[in-house]
Amino acid sequence: MKLLTLQALVAAIEEGSLRAAGKRLGISQPALTKMIRELELELSTTLLVRSTTGVVATAQGMVMYERARAADREIAQAVEQIRQLDGHMTGALTIGAVPLAVMLLIPETLRTFSRDFPHIQLQIAEELYIAQLTRLRKGEVDIALGPLPPELSAGEFVVEELMPISMVAVVRKGNPLARAQSLRELAHAPWVYTGGTPDSGYAKTLFELNGLAAPPTGALVNSTLGLLSIVASGPLVGLLPQQIANHPMATQFLETVHVKEGPLQLTLSALTRIDSHLKPSVRHFMAHLHRAAHQLQG
């Protein structure tokens, strides 16, 4: 099984056409067709279904496709790491970050890191931490930045704590609930949950840590911008990092609810896969993250 053959399968599935796949790889369509056919014979299965409009992967083809993409990423990572160990600081880093990290840590980190390593291309993906962990496991991001999830398996990733986060309750400016003094007074109000399902989320965690049932779900969003928009325009309650809740852009529309139980305390952390932790560009980026976090807290 050759790497070029696997690349041919990946190209065919992504392009949906053998001709387009051949053009992408710089080989003829007959040659590419032969390569995929030989792979199917080697595996004794059908990987692609041909039609007049192109090709579609079978279930077996999708399994091979995912593994081939992962193998291609691993080889590319190995090549970058070897070059960097030889002193050639080139390549790319993909960072998955929650909005708080994008807002507070990323700007200063990018400023200093890009100054020191101008030939490392950086890509920042803003998304929920659940999605980041999935991409980190697949090797699609090099570093994930966000609150450390309590259910994380010990030893799965290298974890470096950066700074504490206080998640505070917020409501629309003028909402009578802004005068609430305890979580019990907010228990029957609809809350905005962030996550994949209403069965999880920081609101649920905050209430359960204080011996209360989770509040009702008024809306489910997958971004901080969505939460801000919904809370600012309706009667719902949400949880935001205190640094964002105190930002002048947010205080125009939102008020913080100061409950006696206090905020939900989390830790903003950086996670990397064990196999990529020693990659020079990753280690340097982590050092710049720590510097930015220290400067922010100082």
Image (cartoon, rainbow, N blue to C red):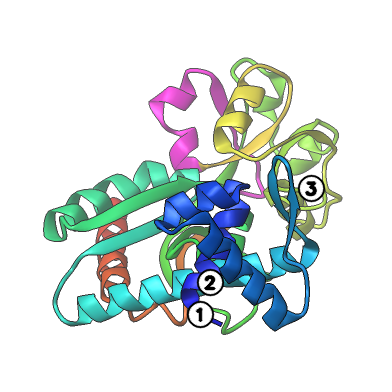
Q: Position of residue 107 (x, y in %)?
A: 29, 45
Q: Which kind of residue does numbered mark 2 sit on?
A: Thr
Q: What is the count of numbered marks?
A: 3
Residue range of the region highlighted in magenta in the rendering: 242-262
Amino acid carrying mark 1 in the image: Lys
Name which residue lies at 32% across and 70% down: 282
Q: Which residue is mark 3?
A: 197
In which quadrant will I find the C terminus?
bottom left
Q: Is residue 193 located in the magenta-colored stretch of the structure?
A: no
Q: Secondary structure at mark 2?
A: helix
Q: Residue at x 56, y 26 (%)?
A: 255
Q: Which residue is mark 2?
A: 5
Closer to the chain start, of discs 3 and 1, is 1
Q: Is residue 258 magenta?
A: yes
* Marks 2 and 1 in Cβ contact (< 8 Å): yes
With 294 as the anchor, is 225 left or right in this view? right
Residue 94, quarter of picture: bottom left
* Separation (CA) of disc 2 from disc 1: 5 Å
Q: Which residue is mark 1?
A: 2
- Which of marks 3 and 2 precedes in the sequence? 2
